[in-house]
Image (tube, coloured by chain):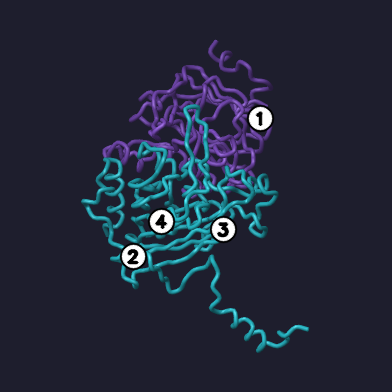
């Protein structure tokens, strides 16, 4: 019955799939019509739509801009960031909120490493509903919510997605550190209570990160751990382009003494 | 006698009893079913606290999983400390302090440079204590995650303002933790002198394990 009984037929069958366009996939070479006018086509680095329940990872150079778009209003991007040259340095979410005296990272905030350096700055943020406290879902929480949370099932959890993303860069279970969840937010009450802001939100909300160090980013796009709805997650679009390194008079760099010293530490790393 | 006061309400036999000096690290195995009591001997002494599963130390305390599961950032009596894989590691069975922190993280030489200035570089820090203890068992910087800060107060205001403020502990107050699995407890008796987490004066704490 099979028409793929010989390698030639199998090759034809495989090759006939080429050029297929689906909703969630990378575009190579990257192409995007909606980047800022001063971004040359050759400066595009990454264009990908991450599937609902999917993940992606990539190294990005200092100065790159990383734009995330919640295309349909129900994405949840759990983000890890590592120093690409020394991945034991990574996002420290406790330092990020403590050093900036602010529980709610948004436009102008920086994402700090455990070494007192700026991994990335939030250059633009039309969402302002993000979560520095709850972290990724895991296999146990997804099993509780959906009956299953395995990568091999249909309700994958964010932690296991981040594990796969990190593993593609040689990293492992010790490296999936506390994350920040983007597009799904929380608010903290006076009694410490955590209230999730889960949307769904207006389509097209976006966030632009200015990458301040050579980094590895790992992103999972799975429902927020406090989301009690039936499985609800929509694709996440990621675009990156080359950009200039932050200058001394940059308004985010100079906004507060803590941020200024974090940039001084970052610049010191690259003084070589 | 002070000692009797500190033992009040504990069941079972005392199998370990130790004073952790001001500014020092501490590491200890606590087996499932045993209870660790931490005594804030002189009051408002932050005890930075991490847990690793004894049988597989890639599984460790997760502040984020713990917060998400209880939908609250404060640790109180009844709070269950969860691992990064969603399993129960320890339960706070009793505490005479209203709540404890798990969002403030540990002080480090590096973060001190941001918070206070580069003149603090030579000061001792919790991350250095955690590293010193963890290195003895083959763990390193990749094993550093957001920790608990017992006896530390980090409120979040309605506008998102967050910070370490005056403590709500007092001399002799305690927290009791029952191990739900065999765990390695790693503590930094916080040496910070630039904010109120230790009342600007690091002091000893007492560790009592009962079985």
3D distance between C-alphas at marks 1 and 3 = 43 Å
Residue under label 2, please give it: A242
The numbered dot on residue A52 is 3
The numbered dot on residue A83 is 4
Residue under label 1, please give it: B34
3D distance between C-alphas at marks 2 and 1 = 55 Å
Few, some or many residues within 10 Å of mark 2 (<14, 14–19, 20+): many
Q: Nearer the viewer, residue A37 or A151?
A: A37
Earlier along the polypeptide chain: callout 2 or callout 4?
4
3D distance between C-alphas at marks 3 and 2 = 27 Å
**Is disc 4 in contact with disc 1, using a CB cutoff of under 8 Å?**
no
Chain of the residue under label 2: A
Q: Nearer the viewer, residue A4 or B134?
A: A4
Few, some or many residues within 10 Å of mark 3 (<14, 14–19, 20+): many
For chain A, what colour was chosen? cyan
Above or below B3: residue B117: below
Disc tally is: 4
3D distance between C-alphas at marks 3 and 4 = 27 Å
- Residue at 52% in and 19% down: B173
Q: Are marks 3 and 4 on the same chain?
A: yes
Chain of the residue under label 4: A
Q: Does B3 sit left or right of B193 as displayed?
A: right
Mark 2, mark 4: which one is toward the viewer?
2
Image quarter where the N terminus of chain B lies is top right
The numbered dot on residue B177 is none
Residue at the far left in the pictured view: A249
Q: Are marks 3 and 2 on the same chain?
A: yes
């Amino acid at each position: 019955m099979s028409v793929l009984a010989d390698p030639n037929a199998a090759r034809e069958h495989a090759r006939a799939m080429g050029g297929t366009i689906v909703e969630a996939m990378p575009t190579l070479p990257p192409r995007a019509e909606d980047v800022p006018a001063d971004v040359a086509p050759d400066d595009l680095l990454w264009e990908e739509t991450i599937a609902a329940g999917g993940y992606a990872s990539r190294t990005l150079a200092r100065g790159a801009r990383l734009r995330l778009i919640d295309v349909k209003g129900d994405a949840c991007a759990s983000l890890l960031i590592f120093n690409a040259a020394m991945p034991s340095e990574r996002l420290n979410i406790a330092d990020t909120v403590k050093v900036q005296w602010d529980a709610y990272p948004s436009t102008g905030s920086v994402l700090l490493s455990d070494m007192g350096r700026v991994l990335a700055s939030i250059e633009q943020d039309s969402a302002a509903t993000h979560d520095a406290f709850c972290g990724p879902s895991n296999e146990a929480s997804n099993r509780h919510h959906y009956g299953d949370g395995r990568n091999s099932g249909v309700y994958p959890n964010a932690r296991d997605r981040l594990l796969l993303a990190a593993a593609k860069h040689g990293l492992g279970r010790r490296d999936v550190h506390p994350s920040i969840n983007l597009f799904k937010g929380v608010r903290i009450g006076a009694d410490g209570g955590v209230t999730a802001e889960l949307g769904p939100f207006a389509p097209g909300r976006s966030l632009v990160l200015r990458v301040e160090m050579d980094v590895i980013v790992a992103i999972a796009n799975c429902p927020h751990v406090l989301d009690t709805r039936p499985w609800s997650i929509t694709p996440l679009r990621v675009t990156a382009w080359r950009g200039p390194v932050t200058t001394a008079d940059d308004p985010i760099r100079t906004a507060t003494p803590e941020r200024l010293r974090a940039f001084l530490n970052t610049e010191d790393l690259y003084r070589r | 006698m002070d000692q009797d006061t500190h033992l009040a309400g504990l069941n079972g036999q005392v199998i370990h009893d130790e004073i952790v000096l001001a500014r020092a690290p501490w590491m200890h195995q606590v087996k499932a079913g045993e209870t660790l009591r931490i005594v804030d001997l002189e009051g408002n002494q932050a005890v930075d606290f991490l847990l690793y599963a004894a049988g597989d130390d890639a599984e460790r305390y997760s502040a984020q999983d713990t917060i998400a599961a209880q939908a609250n950032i404060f640790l109180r009596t009844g709070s269950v400390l969860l691992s990064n894989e969603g399993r129960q590691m320890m339960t706070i069975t009793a505490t005479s302090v209203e709540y404890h922190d798990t969002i403030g993280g540990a002080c480090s030489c590096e973060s001190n440079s941001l918070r206070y200035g580069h003149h603090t570089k030579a000061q001792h820090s919790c991350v250095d204590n955690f590293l010193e203890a963890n290195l003895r068992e083959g763990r390193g910087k990749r094993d550093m995650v957001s920790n608990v800060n017992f006896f530390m107060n980090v409120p979040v205001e309605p506008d998102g303002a967050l910070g370490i403020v005056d403590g709500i502990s007092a001399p002799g107050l305690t927290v009791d933790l029952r191990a739900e699995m065999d765990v390695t407890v790693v503590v930094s008796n916080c040496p910070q002198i630039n904010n109120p987490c230790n009342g600007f004066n690091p002091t000893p704490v007492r560790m009592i394990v009962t079985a």
